[in-house]
Image (cartoon, grey):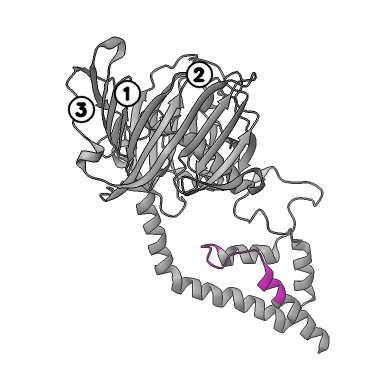
């Protein structure tokens, strides 16, 4: 009787200690598998598969040990375990309506474009920027959480209005002394390999995203500081710039990811580029703040290779089924979908040309990430794909290779890159389709989004 009680307690303790979250949709399926399955991988060999269904920091548990306990359990103990599975299955059945509703809400959030609500407040940023480390230009930007912005430069004169809802940008500048007003559609995805439109890129959102991802993965690599009265992340790196720069010092606003300080220096210690934010504050938003009247100038239409659309409109028009995420961090919603039949070549093109390019833009306040599908055109450019984010770019970005255990990319090599020089991103190629995910995500979030990818269906 004593032995039976001890075995019952062992089974109970085992059930309570399993690393299976009770709220998971497949809780009882995984629980049963954990109780009954043999080890698939010898203890002295690690899998190269990135299996995100199990917590990475969870202690390893021997399934054979589970079997031994179950075999040694008395009938009442085994019955308790079976009762947990059967009754639990019944409970799961009773929870299905709520689970279905939750899944439907996630699907709605990730697959249906939801018009943004009008933001009452945004950010006003005053900063100084130098592309060559010598000539300094002063800017002021007003940014909406929905992605709208107005950027102005004092000298030489520049004004830019951007409406993220319509994708329309109006840019006033004076190249060679002739005032020009360029207007055109610039989808919020920017180019597929640059997840924000160019003008706002002056605030180095890519660098901020990289530093925040590094801080989430390795807190010891950064310092927490206060600058301009705001919580910030201080980071110094000595690699990744390649021929462009040797070292960089970054101070990133924790809440928004905006770079408060960017100092990139060459090997001889001179500046390659720098940006200093002098003021960052909340501001009331209205039409006058985000889209003030622009000076009169010669009008020029910007070329546009992409158009805004939605997934149902694309579903029957493509030669392939684009993959879409079934998971994203809380707060992210599908903001825009853009399509380009082909991509305009860039300087120093190193990859094949792209066709049927579909970009899905997800936003959460000032943060965003983009999932892009494209077909590689056979016989164009290089025979093999390399990192799309380095095409024509002098920067160096280290990456690691893994494999996702499930989803549309299961079994395919996945390149993962988290650094303070480019957007945190992953990319993979299955057949002639190349998929990238990039933006304000940590490594763990990038992998989880990659794991959730599935072919789009109505």
Which stretch did the figure color magenta? 13-26
Q: Secondary structure at mark 3?
A: loop
Q: Looking at the figure, which quarter contains the N terminus? A: bottom right
Quick one: label 1 or label 3, which is nearer the N terminus?
3
Image depth: mark 2 or mark 1 in front: 2
State if disc 3 and disc 1 touch (CB < 8 Å).
no
Nearer the observer, 197 or 187 = 197
Residue 28, given in percent of the width and then of the height, sits at 58, 67
Label 1 – label 3 distance at C-alpha: 25 Å
At horizontal 25% and vertical 38% (from top left) the residue drawn is 290
Count residues near mark 3 (Cα–Cα under 10 Å), then give few for <14, some for 14-19, many for 20+: some
Which circle marks residue 294 in the picture? 3
Label 2 – label 1 distance at C-alpha: 19 Å
Q: Is residue 168 left or right of residue 215?
A: left
Q: Which residue is mark 2?
A: 392
At horizontal 35% and vertical 44% (from top left) the residue drawn is 123
Q: Is residue 68 left or right of residue 429?
A: right
Residue 392, given in percent of the width and then of the height, sits at 50, 18
Q: Which residue is mark 1?
A: 305
Q: To which quarter of the image does residue 268 belong?
A: top right
Count residues near mark 2 (Cα–Cα under 10 Å), then give few for <14, some for 14-19, many for 20+: few
Residue 410, given in percent of the width and then of the height, sits at 57, 42
At horizontal 59% and vertical 42% (from top left) the residue drawn is 214
Residue 340 covered by magenta stretch: no
Outermost residue, bottom direction? 1
- The relative height of residue 4 versus residue 378 in the rendered view (above or below) is below
Image depth: mark 2 or mark 3 in front: 3
Nearer the observer, 93 or 204 = 204
Q: Secondary structure at mark 2?
A: loop
Nearer the observer, 315 or 183 = 183
Residue 279, given in percent of the width and then of the height, sits at 40, 40
């Amino acid at each position: 009787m004593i032995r039976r009680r001890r075995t019952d307690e062992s089974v109970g303790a085992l059930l309570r200690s399993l690393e299976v979250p009770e709220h998971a949709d497949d809780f009882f399926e995984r629980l049963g598998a954990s109780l009954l399955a043999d080890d698939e991988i010898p203890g002295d060999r690690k899998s190269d598969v990135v299996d995100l269904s199990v917590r990475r920091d969870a202690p390893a548990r021997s399934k054979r040990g589970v079997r031994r306990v179950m075999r040694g359990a008395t009938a009442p103990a085994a019955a308790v375990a079976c009762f947990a599975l059967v009754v639990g299955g019944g409970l799961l059945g009773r929870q299905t309506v709520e689970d279905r509703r939750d899944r439907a809400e996630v699907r709605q959030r990730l697959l249906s474009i939801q018009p943004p609500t009008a933001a009452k407040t945004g950010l006003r940023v005053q900063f100084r920027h130098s592309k060559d480390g010598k000539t300094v230009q002063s800017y002021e930007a007003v940014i909406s959480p929905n992605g709208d912005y107005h950027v102005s430069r004092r000298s030489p004169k520049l004004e830019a209005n951007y409406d993220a809802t319509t994708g329309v940008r109006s840019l006033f500048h004076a190249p060679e002394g002739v005032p020009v007003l360029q207007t055109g559609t610039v989808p919020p995805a920017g180019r597929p390999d640059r997840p924000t439109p160019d003008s706002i890129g002056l605030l180095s959102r890519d660098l901020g995203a990289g530093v925040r991802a590094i801080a989430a993965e390795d807190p010891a690599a950064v310092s927490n500081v206060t600058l301009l009265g705001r919580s910030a992340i201080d980071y110094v790196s000595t690699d990744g710039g390649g021929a462009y720069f040797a070292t960089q010092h970054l101070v990133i606003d924790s809440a928004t990811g905006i770079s408060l300080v960017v100092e990139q220096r060459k090997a001889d210690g001179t500046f390659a580029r720098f940006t200093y934010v002098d003021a960052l504050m909340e501001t009331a938003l209205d039409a006058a703040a985000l889209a003030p009247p622009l000076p009169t100038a010669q009008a020029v239409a910007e070329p546009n290779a992409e158009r805004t659309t939605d997934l149902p409109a694309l579903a029957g028009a493509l030669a392939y089924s684009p993959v879409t995420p079934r998971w994203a961090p809380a707060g992210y919603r599908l903001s825009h979908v853009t399509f380009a039949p082909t991509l305009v070549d860039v300087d120093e093109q190193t990859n094949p040309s792209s066709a049927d390019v579909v970009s899905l833009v997800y936003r959460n306040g000032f943060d965003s990430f983009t999932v892009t599908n494209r077909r590689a055109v056979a016989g164009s450019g290089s025979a093999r794909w390399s990192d799309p984010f380095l095409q024509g770019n002098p920067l160096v970005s280290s990456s690691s290779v893994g494999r996702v255990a499930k989803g549309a990319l299961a079994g395919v090599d996945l390149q993962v890159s988290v650094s303070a020089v480019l957007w945190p991103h992953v990319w993979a190629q299955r057949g002639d389709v190349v998929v990238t995910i990039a933006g304000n995500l940590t490594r763990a979030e990038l992998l989880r989004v990659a794991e959730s990818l599935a072919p789009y269906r109505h």
